Structure formats: C-alpha cells, structure tokens
Image (cartoon, rainbow, N blue to C red):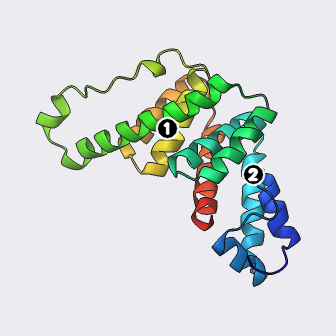
C-alpha cells in the first residue's frame, strides 16, 4: 500500500506472527515517515511478550484475549497460530474466547452496579451463569489473570479489584499481575493502529 517496509515494521509484525507485507493504514504511515513511535511500539510489544513472569504461552494467550476483546480478526488468527506453536490446545484457545465473552457481560453489569451504587441493585441476583469459572481448562490462576486483564481493558473497577484479589489467592505475584496488565495496555495500543 505504501513505500518500503522498514526492518522495524517487519520485526514488529513478526513478534505477533503477522506477515511483513501486512497492510495497516497507520502502521504504514508511521513506517513511511520513519516515525520513532513505531520503534517504541516494537520494543513495547516485544518486551510485553517476553516478560519472564508470564512465560511465552501465557503471554500470547493474554494478547489473544485482548485481540478477541477488541475484535482484531487478523491479529486473532495470527496469535492463535502463535499460541498453538507455543503449546496451546484448541480447548485452551476456546476457553480464552469464552472468558473474554463472560468478562464483557460481567464488566457491563458490574460497572452499572458500581456507577449506580444503589442498595437495591446491589442486592439483586446477577443472574449471569459463570460455570466455566469453576474448573477452567487453563487453571484457576490463569483464568483469573485473564479475567483481570480483560476487566482492566474494559474499565470495570469492581471486576479488576475482585479478580486481582482472586488471582493473588491462586498464587500469582504482583509482578505477574503488573506484567499482564502492561501487556494488555501495549496490545490495546497496538490494535489501535491496526
């Protein structure tokens, strides 16, 4: 679509398993302008995916969750393939999608409760089935971590607080939580340019 593909853009796209010739209006504009932000973005994506507290498979699955949440179809396909290369099963990929869907329901519902802050609403049954949270294929710690990440992206304070407590109770360190949320922030920014 635009001019020559820089090594920085090629490297950025390779980090997320997208082809070097992938067309993206804003990435291509930044590439053509040799803009320093594309270099920052490449470093941010690479660092987020390589956070030692996350591990390669978990990092890609978290990034996949953000891509699903943001409906970034090309990135979803690329990250699913990358996750499979890193050992993810079909059941795990499906559970990431299910978790993202459930968190979207919960984030809307619990944000409403938080915004309204009325005893009447707070005392009513949520009525949202969440059986996948009982025995997740990915394990409770990771399921809670992914739930926290999606809740942070969607801006639900009640869900973020609840899942942060739960993921710590299942053994996650604050460093792991911090790295997961940073990864989500970086991928949200990356998806903005796709």
* Marking on residue 16: 2
On the question of residue 53 being in view, the answer is no
Q: Is residue 183 above or below residue 8?
A: above
Q: Is residue 13 above or below residue 65?
A: below
- Is disc 1 placed on a helix, strand or loop? helix
Specify the farthest residue to the front: 1
Specify the farthest residue to the top: 135
Left or right? Give the position of 161 relative to 75. Answer: left
Identified at 24% across, 41% down, the residue is 113
Split into 4 quadrants, where in the image is the N terminus?
A: bottom right
Q: Position of residue 116 (x, y in %)?
A: 19, 47
* Marking on residue 38: none
Q: Position of residue 19 (x, y in %)?
A: 80, 57
Q: Is residue 63 above or below residue 28?
A: above
Identified at 64% across, 74% down, the residue is 26
In the image, 156 versus 35, the foreground residue is 35
Q: Quadrant of residue 186?
A: bottom right
Identified at 66% across, 51% down, the residue is 75
Q: Quadrant of residue 21?
A: bottom right
* Marking on residue 100: 1
Left or right? Give the position of 12 relative to 7. Answer: left
Split into 4 quadrants, where in the image is the C terminus?
A: bottom right
- Is disc 2 placed on a helix, strand or loop? loop
Identified at 69% across, 39% down, the residue is 80
Q: Position of residue 30 (x, y in %)?
A: 71, 78
Q: Position of residue 83 (x, y in %)?
A: 73, 36
Callout 2 crowding tier (Cα within 10 Å): few <14, some 14–19, many ≥20: many
Q: Quadrant of residue 65?
A: top right
On the question of residue 81 being in view, the answer is yes
């Amino acid at each position: 679509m635009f001019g020559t593909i820089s090594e920085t853009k090629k490297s950025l796209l390779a980090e997320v398993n997208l082809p070097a010739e992938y067309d993206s209006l804003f990435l291509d504009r930044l590439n053509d302008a040799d803009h320093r932000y594309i270099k920052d973005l490449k470093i941010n994506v690479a660092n987020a995916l390589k956070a030692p507290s996350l591990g390669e498979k978990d990092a890609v699955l978290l990034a996949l969750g953000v891509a699903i949440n943001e409906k970034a179809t090309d990135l979803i396909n690329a990250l699913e393939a990358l996750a499979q290369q890193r050992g993810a099963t079909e059941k795990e990929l499906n559970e990431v999608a299910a978790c993202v869907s459930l968190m979207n329901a919960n984030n809307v519902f619990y944000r409403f409760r938080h915004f309204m802050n009325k005893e009447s609403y707070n005392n009513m049954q949520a009525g949202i089935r969440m059986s996948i949270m009982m025995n997740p294929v990915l394990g409770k710690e990771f399921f809670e971590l992914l739930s926290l990440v999606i809740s942070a992206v969607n801006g639900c304070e009640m869900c973020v607080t609840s899942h942060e407590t739960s993921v710590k109770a299942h053994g996650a360190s604050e460093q792991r939580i911090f790295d997961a949320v940073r990864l989500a922030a970086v991928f949200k920014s990356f998806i903005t340019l796709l």
